[in-house]
Each structure stands twice: as structure tokens, then as C-alpha cells.
Amino acid sequence: MPPGCRAHPARTYGVLAGDDSYRGCLEVDMGVTTRGVRGVARVLTGSTYALLGADAFRAPGGRVGTAGPLLASVRQVAPLPEDDELLVRFNAATMVVAGTALALGRLPRLAAAALVASMVPTTLAGHSYWAHDDPAARAQQRIQFHKNLAMIGGLLLAVLDDPGRERPSPPDEPAD
């Protein structure tokens, strides 16, 4: 390391800033940064599901009718209660509980998996763009469908996230 530079005591990675004479002088504690970003991501993601789920639980309204055709199809292959409003409220409660758990960092991988399980039927029932004849409605639902796919993708990353697993440190640079 160049004179005048000192390493951070935590796991750090040198950042190259121009030429090799600066190698190692600019360092970032990736452990602190990763923990901070992970926490912010969980709060942003989890709170969104908790709020949307609370709204759906309080006033399922049109969601019940929208979910009806999908629930009828599922009932042909799996036993489900006949009360569509009960199922919509159950899905909403799942979003509230799992979203809150994710936001608080409590069993985050399990919470994210529960949200994935909730989002798949929500997406299929709520944004079946292929069932719309009106081009404007079809386009809007297609956007919402793909937005939900992106949300599911983010949740799948959270399911795979393992903050306790140490990442290997980069190898030390060879001495000249």
C-alpha cells in the first residue's frame, strides 16, 4: 500500500483511482455498505407489500371479482374455500405479515418466499392483459403484469440472499 494510506480494519476492497500509485488508498468497507443497502432494500420492499396488503385486506372490493375466474380455475384441480373474499383477504394478510417481517429483517428469506407465493396468483388474476380486448387496457395491464414480474424477481433475489455467508476476500496483490 502506498505511504500515507492505511487500511480500514474491516474487510475492504481497494479502488483504483487513475494510476497504480493510488491503488489501495481509496477503500470502502463493503461489509458496512452491504448491510446498510440490504436493510434499506428490505424496508423499501417489505413496507410496500405491507401497505398494499393492508389496503386489500380493509377493502377487497373489485379484487374479489377480478380474482374469481382464476380461483374458479384453481378449484378444478385443488380444494379451495368457495368464499372468494376470504381468499382475497387471506392473500392480503399474507402480504401484510410477510411484508412486515421482510421490512423488519425477521426471517427475511421465508418472508420473501411467502410474498412470491402471494404475488404469483395476484399477478395472474389482477393483470391478465391477454384477456383484454381494448388495446389501451391491454397495454396498461401488460405494464402492470411485467412490473409484478420485476417485483417477483426482486423477491427471488431476497429468497436467495444469505447475509451470514461470508464472501471470499480478494487475493492479496503480489509484492513487486
Image (tube, rainbow, N blue to C red):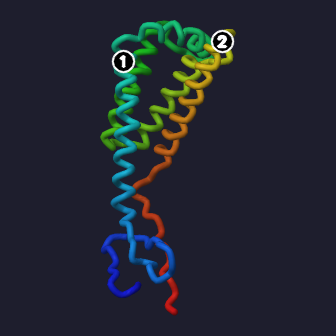
Q: Residue at x 32, y 74 (%)?
A: 8
Q: Residue at x 33, y 70 (%)?
A: 10
Q: What amino acid is at disc 2? A: His
| Residue 113 pos. (x, y %) | 47, 37
Circle nearer the N terminus (1, 2): 1
| Residue 72 pos. (x, y %) | 59, 10
Drawn side of residue 170 relative to residue 100, left or right: right
Residue 40: image quadrant is top left
**Image height of 18 relative to 78, above or below:** below
Q: Residue furthest bottom?
A: 176
**Image height of 103 relative to 34, above or below:** above
How packed mark 2 is, by other alpha carbons closer than 10 Å (few <14, some 14-19, many 20 or more), is some
**Image height of 2 relative to 121, above or below:** below
Query: Who is closer to the viewer here, 121 or 86?
Result: 121
| Residue 166 pos. (x, y %) | 43, 64
Drawn side of residue 81 relative to residue 105, left or right: right
Provide the secondary structure element on which disc 1 rests.
helix
Q: What amino acid is at disc 1? A: Asp
Q: Residue at x 53, y 12 (%)?
A: 67
Q: Which residue is mark 2?
A: 132
Would you say the residues marked 1 and 2 are in contact, meaning their CB atoms lie under 8 Å apart? Answer: no
| Residue 25 pos. (x, y %) | 39, 77
Task: Tell us which disc is closer to us: 1 or 2.
Answer: 2
Residue 31: image quadrant is bottom left
Q: Residue at x 48, y 81 (%)?
A: 172
Q: Which residue is mark 1?
A: 55
